[in-house]
Image (tube, rainbow, N blue to C red):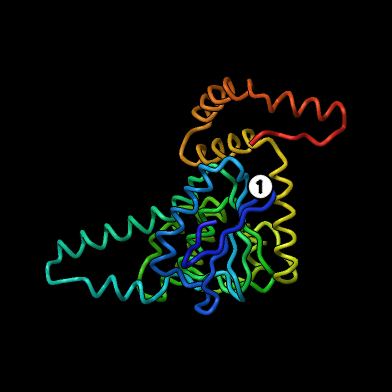
Amino acid sequence: MTEYQAFQVELTDKVAHVAINRPEKANAMNAAFWTEIIDIFRWVDETDEVRVVVLSGNGKHFSSGIDLQLLAQATSQLGNDIGRNAERLRHKILSLQASLNAVDHCRKPVIAAIQGCCVGGAVDLISACDMRYSTADAQFSIKEIDMGMAADVGTLQRLPRIIGDGMMRELAYTGRNVSGEEAQAIGLVNRTYVDQSALMDGVFALAAEIAAKSPLAIRGTKEMIRYMRDHRVDDGLEYMATWNAAMLQSADLKVAMAAHMTKQKPDFAD
C-alpha cells in the first residue's frame, strides 16, 4: 500500500480501512490530509477489490477538525487587495470542499467509526460518509461558530438530510457538544458502542456483511440514494429504470438466485 503522511490505509477481505493517523495531534486535518484523501478515495473508487471503506481515527480521538496551522497559513497569505483576497479564499475553500466531495462521491459505501472528539471539519467529514457509528462517550461539535465563522466544507449542506433542519440549526448556532448517546437519538449515528474496541469490531462486522453482497448492486443502491438527495421522486424512478435496464443483466443476479435456492453463500466477482 502507498505510504501517507496523514493516513494509514489497509485492505483486508474486500474492506479498506482508512485511518487518520496523526494521534499525537488528535488527528487534526493538516495540509497533507486534504490532498491525500482525494488520492485515497480515487484509489478506492478505481480498485474493484475494494467493496467497502471503514473510516476511523487512530488514537483517543477521531479528529479535532481542521489544523489551526492550516488556517493561520491561509490568512497569512492575504494582502491588501480585497478582491484578490476574496478570490484566493474562495479558491481555497472550494479545494477543501473537493476533498470531502471525494468521500461523498465514492461509489463504495463509507462507514465512519468515531471515538473521542469529532469537531468542526471532522463533522464535515462524517457528514460525507454513508453511515456513522460511535462510542457512547464520543463528543461531536460544529465548532466553527465559536471561531467566528460558518462551517464551509459540507456540514451545513449535508447534515440537514441526516438529522433534520431544526436540529442542525441548533447545533450550528450554538456549537454545543453532543454525546454519542444523543447523536444516536437524533440520527447522527446509527448505533453506539461501549468502547473503541467494541466499536471497531461492530463496524468491521457490518463492513464484512456489506462486502459479501453483490458489489454491483451495492454501488447501484448508493448511486440511487445519492441521486435522490437533489431530485424529485419521478426523476429518481426514471433514472432507476434506466440504470437497472442494464444492471439486471449482470451475472450477479443469477449468482444470488442460485445461492438462495441452494442455501449457499454467494461468491460475487469484483
The residue depicted at 50 percent of the width and 62 percent of the height is 3
The residue depicted at 57 percent of the width and 69 percent of the height is 62
The residue depicted at 38 percent of the width and 67 percent of the height is 31
Q: Quadrant of residue 250?
A: top right
- Which is more toward the observer, 123 or 8? 8
The N terminus sits in image quarter: bottom right
**Residue where numbered disc 1 is placed:** 14
Vertical relation: 39 (above or below) 225: below
- Which is more toward the observer, 84 or 236? 84
Residue found at the far bottom of this picture: 24
Label 1: few (<14), some (14–19) or many (≥20) C-alpha neighbours in 10 Å: some
For the question of whether residue 86 can be seen, the reply is yes
Vertical relation: 254 (above or below) 122: above
Q: Is residue 107 left or right of residue 261?
A: left
Q: Position of residue 98 (x, y in %)?
A: 39, 53
For the question of whether residue 174 can be seen, the reply is no
Q: Quadrant of residue 258?
A: top right
Q: Position of residue 114 (x, y in %)?
A: 62, 66
Q: Tell me the amino acid under the disc marked 1.
A: Lys
